[in-house]
Image (spheres, coloured by chain):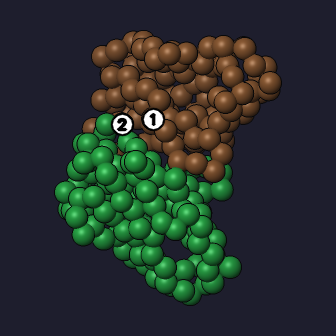
Amino acid sequence: SQQGEEDPQALSIQEGENATMNCSYKTSINNLQWYRQNSGRGLVHLILIRSNEREKHSGRLRVTLDTSKKSSSLLITASRAADTASYFCATAPGNNRLAFGKGNQVVVIP
Amino acid sequence: DTAVSQTPKYLVTQMGNDKSIKCEQNLGHDTMYWYKQDSKKFLKIMFSYNNKELIINETVPNRFSPKSPDKAHLNLHINSLELGDSAVYFCASSQIGGREQYFGPGTRLTVT
């Protein structure tokens, strides 16, 4: 899982399997976002979930948010080799900025 | 069609030199950011501008000076470069703070 103080996690899966990664945070938030970063590239926004939402879907992505536990999960279903990337969660505490976690490295083996 | 562009993509320089990185966005966003990503991929915000006004200024050495000539451009000038400045620097933009951000491709700075 991603937290401000933990090392990034790595996940290696076979193509077609599901990948789940977690994110925890410490402050109250307006929203939580997930980003993907392919090797050598910039971050790409994937999905935003508001603090009053519990679950959100976008294509093969499913994000959950539990504000009571201050945690979120990102599920990628039917993974593909192109999903190999680092995935970051970012929280918006409402002060015009995002606080990024340290990222989860996902490797999808063809 | 590039939404957020940065130049240069790679920058190799010696300690003590001064260098600049340029960023431009064509998304019509009001807010722009500079981030530093270290070797462990930790992303740390450095500065943010909203409509050319500095709104976030993290604890960054004053050798780093951002400049926003207009709301579509945010440049970063670094004086007296040090080895510890080696990192990837990302520019990003968003319509308003706290919303989804659009990142540039990054500038890999190597100080030797």
Q: Is residue B13 above or below residue A38?
A: below
Q: Amino acid at mark 1?
A: His
Residue for point 69% across, 22% down? A80
Instruction: Give residue B107's position: percent from left, percent from top.
Output: 54, 62
Q: Is residue B99 left or right of residue B45?
A: left
On-image quarter of the C terminus of chain A: top right
Instruction: Give residue A20's position: percent from left, percent from top.
Output: 63, 19
Share a chain, discs 1 and 2? no
- Specify the quadrant of the image occupied by residue B45: bottom left
Q: Which residue is mark 2?
A: B100
Q: Residues within 10 Å of mark 2 (few under 14, many from 20)?
A: many
Q: Is residue A50 above or below residue B55?
A: above
Chain B shown in which color? green
Q: Residue furthest front?
A: B1
Residue B74 visible in the displayed image: yes
- Specify the quadrant of the image occupied by residue A7: top right
- Specify the quadrant of the image occupied by residue B57: bottom left
Supply the letter of whichever chain is brown: A
Q: Nearer the viewer, residue A9 or B2?
A: B2
3D distance between C-alphas at marks 1 and 2: 7 Å
Judging from the image, mark 2 belongs to the subunit labelled B
Number of marks in the rendered image = 2
Instruction: Give residue A59's position: percent from left, percent from top.
Output: 50, 16
Dot 2 lies on which element? loop
Q: Is residue A48 left or right of residue A110?
A: left
- Residue A45: which numbered mark, if any? 1
Q: Are marks 1 and 2 in contact (CB under 8 Å)?
A: yes
Residue for point 45% across, 75% down? B20
Judging from the image, mark 1 belongs to the subunit labelled A
Dot 1 lies on which element? strand
Instruction: Give residue B74's position: percent from left, percent from top.
Output: 33, 64
Residue for point 61% across, 24% down? A21
